[in-house]
Image (spheres, rainbow, N blue to C red):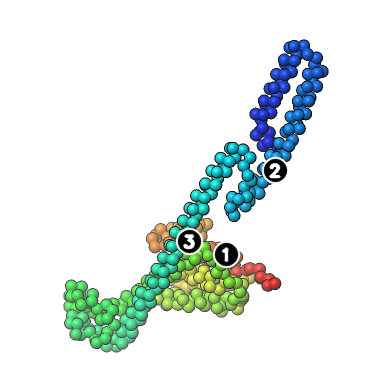
Amino acid sequence: MKTTRAFFRERKRELGLCAILLGTFAIVSYLYGIRMDAVEYALLLSAVWVLLLGIPDYLRFVRRHKELLEAEKGLESGIDGIPDACTLLEEDYQRIITRLYEARIEAESAGRIARQEMVDYYGMWVHQIKTPIAAMYVLLQALEECQLEDEGTPQHTLTDEAQMPEGDALRGTFGHPFRDEAHWPRGGMDCGAPFGYLKEMKMELFKIEQYVEMVLTYLRMEEMSSDLSFESCSLDSIIKQAVRKYSQMFILKKIQLVYTPIEMKVLTDEKWLVFVLEQILSNALKYTSTGKISVYTKGQNCLVIEDTGIGIWPEDLPRVFEKGFTGYNGRKDKKSTGIGLYLCKSVIDKLKHQIWIESEAGKGTKVYLSLQRNMMRHE
């Protein structure tokens, strides 16, 4: 019915012209006194000719319409499926479409090349930045060992460089700022002073490492589907991997972890699910200053990560998984990127799991991971 109406709308000028010609013929015949039965017979023959010419035209219109619909479905693979032009105007339209298609292909190709160059650059940057991060970990470890060696001995000052023990890690690592007497407080520098910042330095360095890994994960998101490998995994092992990575953060922030081993198997991709748990634990630690973080199961294949942090405001909850959304806490903290939960949601969707959050401002947050998934059949 829709096609028929479209046909008559497209042919309304021709049909109108036929009606005018037939009407003119009938009026002139009447004025000249021609017998009306002869006029009616002539009009009937004219209508028959209109039908005989119109029906094939209508069938061609319907066939053309179907061919264009089929060509539309195959546009993803190219414009070769578009039927040949029958009129000059159709040739003009097809020429315009071809040019637009070629411009689109060029733009997409340029975009892919630019993105690949960006991915390659940041991939190289991530691997390069890991070297100084590892070196800083080694230096902090050396400084920590120096602290252990100095425990139980009288504190000494750096007013005289000779007072520093030979081979001291401070001397090799932080020696030059301490040698500059302009930076020393009156009466000399207490050698124990830098040790007070060890915890904060280790915590900030760990954050840097996490942000670097987040960059790499963000870049790999588009190609994630080809990297998925589903298998039956131990949920307890996956949780322990994530907790082990943040063990130092739990210790440094003095946050209690409440966790009982879970005997459960889930069908998932272990690497990507570990990434999701790490991001959730990272947020929990970030917004929990005192109290505890609990990891437990609820119902069938539902994992819960609960913290006693600052919580999330009710108006922010519906948007926490949006890309770049930081909410009230993020605006207050001014350090949130709004990427962590977005990545979690993206990964969970591709794993065919579910994630949702319940929270109350000032009391804490619960993150639910439904790991239920239909078992895959191997043929």
Labels 2 and 3: the sequence-earlier one: 2
Give the amino acid type for the residue marked by disc 2 in the picture.
Arg
For the residue carrying disc 1, how many other residues have a C-alpha within 10 Å: few (<14), some (14-19), or many (20+)? some
Q: Is residue 313 visible?
A: no
For label 1, the SS is helix
Name the residue rendered at 72%, 15% in the picture: 28
Q: Look at mark 3 in the image and give the residue it sits on.
A: 312
Mark 2 or 3, closer to the camera:
2
Q: Nearer the viewer, mark 3 or mark 1?
A: 1
Type of amino acid under label 1: Lys
Query: Which mark is first along the chain, 2 or 1?
Result: 2
Residue at image mark 2? 63
314 or 79: which is nearer to us?
79
Q: Is residue 267 left or right of residue 147?
A: right
Q: What x and y, as percent, mark residue 62?
A: 70, 41
Residue 44's image quarter? Answer: top right
Other-residue count near label 3 (Cα within 10 Å), few / some / many at <14 / 14–19 / ≥20: many
Q: Is residue 15 visible?
A: yes
Residue 56's place in the image compared with 147, above or below, is above
